[in-house]
């Protein structure tokens, strides 16, 4: 699932950004905590730990691999180390497809940048993990159970005060299926006009797929 790499890779990958690094131990959970804390991202760590714990509960409910779900939670926002401007530069320099809303709000690229860091710096090769991390904000058409699990866990374990306004709808959906929980969140966001701009292409494709296949 992973191979050891040196944290100096992070500096090399991001053009010498002032990212504090440390020796790689091979323990992803411990290394995520050390890296985020070293760079003043304590709140991000609290969030990813909460998502990991929520995702493990979802894994137990739906018979998924708890280790995979836990790692998805810890790694999904590791891109908090990278400023949005640098995220967009990376996407442009590597000729990625860039959705209009990602160009307007580059921080939306963080799901895809987290994949880069997870693969190149943490040595993660499991495509179930990389796909789930890479679509935890937008989801995608024909999502795997792991894609939907971290998508839902990220919403239920959100990083703001109190319970999210969509908690009841999503939690009720989760009692039926991962698809129902995912669509409940997406419908809430659209119906309450809470999306930042017009939906990302992948979001729209995911919504259409869920509505057709549930």
Image: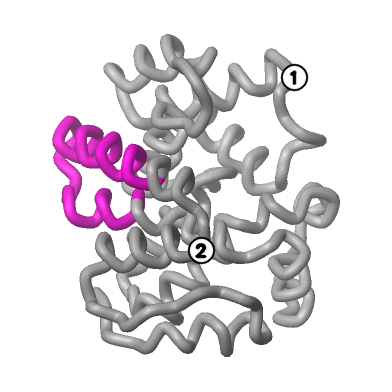
* Residue 142 seen in render: no
- Dot in front, 2 or 1: 2
Q: Which residue is mark 2?
A: 39
Left or right: residue 44 versus residue 191 is left
Majority secondary structure in the magenta region = helix
Residue 153 quadrant: top left
The quarter of the image holding the C terminus is top left
- Give the vertical position of 149 relative to 32 (above or below): above
Residue drawn at 35 percent across, 12 percent down: 172
Residue 31 quadrant: bottom left
Magenta range is: 48-73
Q: Position of residue 168 (x, y in %)?
A: 42, 10
Left or right: residue 134 versus residue 67 is right
* Residue 175 seen in render: yes
- Give the vertical position of 161 relative to 77 (above or below): above
Residue drawn at 78 percent across, 49 percent down: 105
N-terminal of the pair, mark 2 or mark 1, is 2
Distance from the alpha carbon under mark 2 to that under mark 1: 34 Å
Q: Which residue is mark 1?
A: 193
Residue 150 quadrant: top left
> 127 and 167: which one is in front?
167
Q: Residue 188 colored magenta?
A: no
Q: Residue 53 colored magenta?
A: yes
Tag 1's secondary structure?
loop
> 201 and 29: which one is in front?
29
The quarter of the image holding the N terminus is bottom left
Residue drawn at 56 percent across, 57 percent down: 80
Q: Position of residue 181 (x, y in %)?
A: 41, 24
- What is the crowding at mark 2: few (fewer than 14 residues within 10 Å), some, or many (at least 20)? some
């Amino acid at each position: 699932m992973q191979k050891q790499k040196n944290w100096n890779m992070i500096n090399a990958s991001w053009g010498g950004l002032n990212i504090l690094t440390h020796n790689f131990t091979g323990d992803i959970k411990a290394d995520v905590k050390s890296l985020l804390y070293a760079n003043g991202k304590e709140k991000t760590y609290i969030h990813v730990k909460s998502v990991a714990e929520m995702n493990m509960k979802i894994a137990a409910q739906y018979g998924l691999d708890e280790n995979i779900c836990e790692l998805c939670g810890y790694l999904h926002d590791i891109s908090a180390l990278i400023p949005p401007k640098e995220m967009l530069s990376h996407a442009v320099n590597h000729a990625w497809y860039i959705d209009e809303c990602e160009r307007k709000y580059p921080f939306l690229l963080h799901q895809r940048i987290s994949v880069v860091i997870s693969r190149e710096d943490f040595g993660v090769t499991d495509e179930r993990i990389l796909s789930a991390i890479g679509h935890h904000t937008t989801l995608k058409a024909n999502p795997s159970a792991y894609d939907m699990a971290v998508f839902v866990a990220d919403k239920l374990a959100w990083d703001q005060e109190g319970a999210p306004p969509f908690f009841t709808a999503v939690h009720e959906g989760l009692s039926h299926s991962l698809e129902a929980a995912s669509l409940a969140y997406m419908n809430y966001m659209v119906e309450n006009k809470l999306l930042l701009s017009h939906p990302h292409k992948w979001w729209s494709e995911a919504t259409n797929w869920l509505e057709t296949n549930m």
